[in-house]
C-alpha cells in the first residue's frame, strides 16, 4: 500500500504532475482492488477541497489515457495490461526513450517518468496509452523481460562510505550506487566496470559492484580497454583456446596435398597494407596456350584448421569478427592461426580454398573452378609497392600486376555500368606516438592497387554465390525445413547459403535525402532503383573535391539500407549483384567460414542443410558486425577529440554537416572531426531554425547558416569522457 503523504505543502494542495504520478503509483501497488475517489484521497492523505477536486479530474484523465478502468460508476481499478507490446529500448540523451517493436508500425515514445528501471537495449513489455489523434504512440514500460547487458563502464565518484559510478554512455541516464565493500579497490576518479546487482522498486539508482578497475581516464590503454568493455568485446583469448591453437600442426601431409589442386608452380603474390600481419588472400596468374589468362583468387583455408564443434570454433563464432580499433586489432582467431598457419606468407606452402577463372583480354570469364588448393606465394607486396609498378611500369612482377590491373579496370567499369554504386569514403587514420597519443591525422586513399584487389575479391564473392545458387540447383535434394521455420521466414527455393544482402533504400530516408541534395543545387532522379544508383554515382562524381563531399557521402550512406547476412537472398543493391556472399576473409569474418563449409558441402554432393540453423548464425554474425563497427567508430571519435584537445583555441576551416534547433554541426576539412556550434554561442543575433531549408536564420541581420556552407571555427572545448567537441564560429 502506498505511503501516506503527511507533509505535502502542509496538505494544502498537490503539484498536478506529482499527484498524477502518485495516483497511478498507488493503483499499480494495488492492481486488483476497486477504489472510489474518497478512498484514494484517504490513502494519499488528501484533505483540502481543491486537491480533492483535482484528484477527481486526474482519475478521469487516467481512464482516458487507458491506465485505469472505471468498472462501476465512480469506482476505479488499474486497467489490465492487455494492450501491451514487446520491444527493445533505445534511450535518448535526455532520459526519454523509444521502444522498437515488430508488433507495431511506429516506435513507441516513453517519457522519462515511465521508463521504470529499464536500461538501453533491454527487451521490455510496454503498456500502450490510447492513441490521440495525430499523435505517435506513447506508453509505459511495465516489465523488464531481458537485460541487454549488466556490465557498464564509468568513472568512480567516492563519497563517505559509498560511491557512485557515472556511466560513460550517454544512453545510460542513471548513476550506479556502490557500497563501500563493493569497490574492489577502486579509487576516486578511476575508470571501472560496474555490474548491476539490483534495482528494486522505488530505488532511484540501481545498486552495483565494481568488478574491474581499468585505470585513470585519459590513459591510452585505459580508454581502448574501456571501449572494448563497453561493447563487450573480449581482448584476450581463454587459456583453453590458446592451448588448442598451439596443438595445430603446419605439416602438410602427402595425403592432404594429394587431395588438392597444386598451384605451387604458378606465379602467386599477395597485396596488403604495409603494416598487415595476416594475409588471407593471394592472386595467381598464368598465361595459357590459347592466349587467355588463368587467374586464381586464393583464400586461406581456415576451415582445414578450424574444425566445427571444437573450442577454437566456438570461440571464433562467439567473436564472429575481428575488431579494428585505432591502435590494435582484436582478432577473431588466435595469433598462431591468423598470423601463421592461415597467413599466406611468401616462400612457404599454404593450404587454400580457391576460385579460379579463365579470362580473356577483355575480362570475359570463359570457365571457372572452385576447390581446395595448395599455393606457394612468391612475393608479398604492400599496396604502395604494387601502385609503384602500376605507375612506373617497372619492378619485379610488373607484367603480372599490369595485366591484373587492366582486367580489374575493365571489370570495375562494367560493374558501375550495371548499377554498382561508388562510395569513396574518407577513412580516417592516426599517427600515434609511443604512448598512443595522436600526433597527426591522415586519410587512407584507395588507389589502383587497392581497387585491383577489391575487384578480384568481389569477383570471387559473386561467383561463389552464383555457383552454389545456380550451378548445383535442382541436382541436390533439399532437407525439408520445419513447419515453424516456414512460418517464420520466406524460404528460398535455392540451396541454403549465407548471402551478403543489401536492400533498396528506405523510401522515407531517400525522400529526405533528395530534399536535401536538391536544396544544395544538385539534380537527382529517383524514378526507379536503377535511376537512383545512376544518380548516386553522378552525384558522388559531382561533389568530388568539393568541401561538402564527405558530408553528402555520409548522408548518402545513411540513406542506404545496411548490408547484412541472410539465407534469404534479395541481392546486393549497392553492388548491383543478384548473388553475392562473403568468401574472401575467413581469418577475420566468421560468415566467410560458414560460406567455405557450405561450398565444400555442395562440392561433395551433399544435400542442402536446413535453412533455419544457417539463418540463426547469419543473424548473429550481423549483430556482432554492427557492434564491432560501433566500437571502431567510438575509438576513432575518442582519438579525434583527444587530438583536438591539444588544439583548443586554434582555428580550422570546415563545412556545416548538420543543422538543428540547438546548433550547427561542423566537420573540419583538415581531419574530418565533427563538433557542435551551440545556438547559445551564436551571439551576434537571435537565430531561428528553418527545418524545411536546413538552415539557421538571424532574426535581425538575416544572416543564414546553411547545410553545406563553409565556415571557420575555433576549438572551444573537447570532452574526452563524452567524446564531444564544441566549436565557436569565427570571422576571418
Image (cartoon, rainbow, N blue to C red):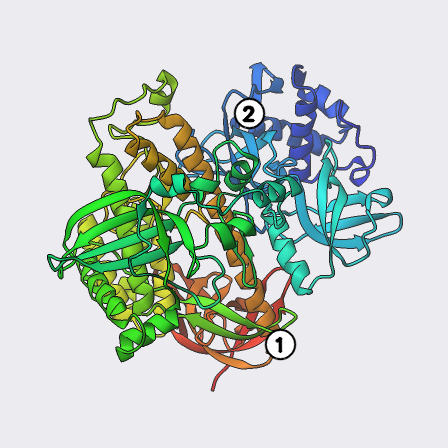
What is the spatial separation of the Cα atoms under label 2 and label 1, in whole angstroms?
57 Å
Q: Residue at x 57, y 26 (%)?
A: 67
Q: Residue at the left extreme?
A: 290
Image quadrant containing the N terminus: top right
Q: Please identify the residue farthest to the bottom as the structure is shown.
A: 732
375, 569: nearer the viewer: 375
Depth order, front residue of 586/44 = 586
Residue 583 image point, x, y percent: 35, 46
The answer to whether residue 725 shows anywhere in this view is no
**Mark 1 packing: few (<14 Cα in 10 Å), some, or many (20+)?**
few
Q: Earlier in the sequence, mark 2 or mark 1?
A: 2
Question: Is residue 503 shown to the viewer in this render?
Answer: yes
Q: Label for residue 646?
A: 1
Q: Secondary structure at mark 2?
A: helix
Q: Secondary structure at mark 1?
A: loop
Give percent across and percent down for residue 62: 58, 28
Report whether 645 appears left or right of 612.
right
Q: Nearer the viewer, mark 2 or mark 1?
A: 1
Question: Where does label 2 land, which residue?
Answer: 63
Q: Are marks 2 and 1 in contact (CB under 8 Å)?
A: no
Q: Nearer the viewer, residue 128 or 665?
A: 665
Give the image quarter of residue 363.
bottom left
Q: Mark 2 Cα within 10 Å, few/some/many (few <14, many 20+)?
A: some
Number of on-image labels? 2
166 left or right of 672?
Answer: right
Amino acid at each position: 500500500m502506498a505511503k501516506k503523504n503527511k507533509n505535502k505543502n502542509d496538505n494544502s494542495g498537490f503539484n498536478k504532475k506529482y499527484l498524477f504520478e502518485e495516483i497511478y503509483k498507488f493503483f499499480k501497488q494495488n492492481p486488483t482492488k476497486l477504489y472510489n475517489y474518497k478512498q484514494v484521497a484517504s490513502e494519499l492523505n488528501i484533505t483540502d477541497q481543491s486537491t480533492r477536486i483535482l484528484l477527481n479530474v486526474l482519475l478521469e484523465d487516467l481512464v482516458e489515457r487507458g491506465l485505469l478502468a472505471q468498472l462501476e460508476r465512480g469506482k476505479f481499478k488499474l486497467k489490465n495490461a492487455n494492450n501491451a507490446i514487446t520491444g527493445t529500448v533505445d534511450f535518448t540523451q535526455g532520459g526519454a526513450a523509444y521502444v522498437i517493436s515488430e508488433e507495431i508500425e511506429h516506435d513507441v515514445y516513453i517519457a522519462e517518468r515511465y521508463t521504470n528501471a529499464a536500461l538501453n537495449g533491454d527487451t521490455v513489455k510496454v503498456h500502450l496509452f490510447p492513441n490521440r489523434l495525430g499523435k505517435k504512440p506513447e506508453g509505459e514500460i511495465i516489465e523488464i523481460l531481458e537485460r541487454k547487458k549488466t556490465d557498464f563502464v564509468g568513472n568512480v565518484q567516492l563519497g563517505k562510505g559509498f560511491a557512485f559510478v557515472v556511466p560513460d554512455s550517454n544512453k545510460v541516464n542513471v548513476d550506479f550506487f556502490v557500497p563501500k565493500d563493493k569497490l574492489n579497490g577502486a579509487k576516486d576518479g578511476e575508470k571501472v566496470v560496474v555490474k548491476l546487482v539490483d534495482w528494486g522498486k522505488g530505488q532511484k539508482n540501481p545498486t552495483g559492484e565494481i568488478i574491474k578497475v581499468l585505470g585513470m581516464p585519459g590513459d591510452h590503454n585505459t580508454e581502448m580497454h574501456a571501449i572494448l568493455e563497453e561493447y563487450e568485446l573480449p581482448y584476450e583469448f581463454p587459456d583453453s583456446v590458446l592451448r588448442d591453437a598451439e596443438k595445430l600442426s603446419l605439416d602438410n601431409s602427402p595425403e592432404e596435398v594429394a587431395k588438392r589442386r597444386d598451384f605451387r608452380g604458378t606465379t602467386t603474390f599477395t597485396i596488403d597494407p604495409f603494416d598487415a600481419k595476416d594475409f588471407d588472400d593471394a592472386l595467381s596468374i598464368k598465361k595459357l596456350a590459347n592466349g587467355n589468362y588463368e587467374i586464381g583468387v586464393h583464400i586461406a583455408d581456415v576451415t582445414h584448421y578450424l574444425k566445427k564443434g571444437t573450442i577454437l570454433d566456438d570461440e571464433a563464432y562467439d567473436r564472429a569478427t575481428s575488431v579494428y580499433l585505432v591502435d590494435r586489432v582484436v582478432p577473431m582467431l588466435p595469433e598462431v592461426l591468423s598470423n601463421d598457419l592461415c597467413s599466406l606468407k611468401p616462400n612457404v606452402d599454404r593450404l587454400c580454398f580457391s576460385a579460379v577463372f579463365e579470362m580473356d583480354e577483355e575480362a570475359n570469364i570463359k570457365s571457372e573452378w572452385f576447390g581446395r588448393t595448395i599455393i606457394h606465394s612468391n612475393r608479398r607486396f604492400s599496396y604502395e609497392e604494387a601502385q609503384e609498378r602500376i605507375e612506373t611500369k617497372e619492378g619485379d612482377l610488373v607484367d603480372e600486376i599490369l595485366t591484373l590491373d587492366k582486367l580489374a579496370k575493365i571489370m570495375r567499369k562494367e560493374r558501375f555500368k550495371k548499377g554498382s554504386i561508388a562510395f569513396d569514403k574518407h577513412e580516417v587514420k592516426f599517427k600515434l606516438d609511443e604512448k598512443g597519443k595522436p600526433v597527426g591525422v591522415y586519410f587512407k586513399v584507395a588507389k589502383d592497387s587497392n581497387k585491383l584487389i577489391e575487384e578480384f575479391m568481389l569477383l570471387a564473392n559473386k561467383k561463389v554465390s552464383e555457383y552454389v545458387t545456380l550451378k548445383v540447383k535442382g541436382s541436390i535434394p533439399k532437407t525439408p525445413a520445419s513447419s515453424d521455420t516456414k512460418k517464420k521466414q520466406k524460404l528460398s527455393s535455392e540451396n541454403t547459403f549465407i548471402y551478403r544482402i543489401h536492400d533498396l533504400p528506405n523510401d522515407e530516408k531517400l525522400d529526405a535525402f533528395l530534399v536535401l541534395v536538391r536544396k544544395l543545387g544538385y539534380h537527382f532522379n529517383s524514378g526507379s532503383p536503377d535511376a537512383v544508383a545512376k544518380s548516386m554515382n553522378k552525384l558522388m562524381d559531382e561533389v568530388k573535391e568539393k568541401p561538402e563531399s564527405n558530408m553528402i557521402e555520409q548522408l548518402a550512406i545513411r540513406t542506404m539500407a545496411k548490408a547484412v547476412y541472410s539465407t534469404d537472398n534479395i541481392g546486393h543493391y549497392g553492388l548491383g549483384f543478384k548473388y553475392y556472399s562473403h568468401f574472401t576473409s575467413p581469418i577475420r569474418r566468421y560468415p566467410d567460414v560458414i560460406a567455405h563449409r557450405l561450398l565444400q558441402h555442395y562440392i561433395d554432393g551433399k544435400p542442402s542443410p536446413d535453412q533455419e540453423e544457417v539463418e540463426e548464425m547469419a543473424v548473429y554474425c550481423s549483430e556482432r558486425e554492427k557492434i564491432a563497427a560501433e566500437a571502431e567508430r567510438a575509438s576513432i571519435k575518442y582519438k579525434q577529440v583527444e587530438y583536438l584537445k591539444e588544439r583548443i583555441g586554434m582555428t580550422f576551416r570546415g563545412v556545416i554537416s548538420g543543422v538543428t534547433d540547438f546548433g550547427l554541426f561542423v566537420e573540419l576539412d583538415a581531419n574530418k572531426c565533427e563538433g557542435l556550434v551551440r545556438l547559445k554561442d551564436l551571439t551576434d543575433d537571435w537565430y531561428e531554425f528553418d527545418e524545411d531549408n536546413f538552415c539557421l536564420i538571424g532574426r535581425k541581420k538575416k544572416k543564414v547558416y546553411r547545410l553545406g556552407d563553409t565556415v571557420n571555427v575555433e576549438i572551444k572545448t573537447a570532452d574526452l569522457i563524452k567524446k564531444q567537441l564544441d566549436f565557436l564560429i569565427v570571422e576571418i
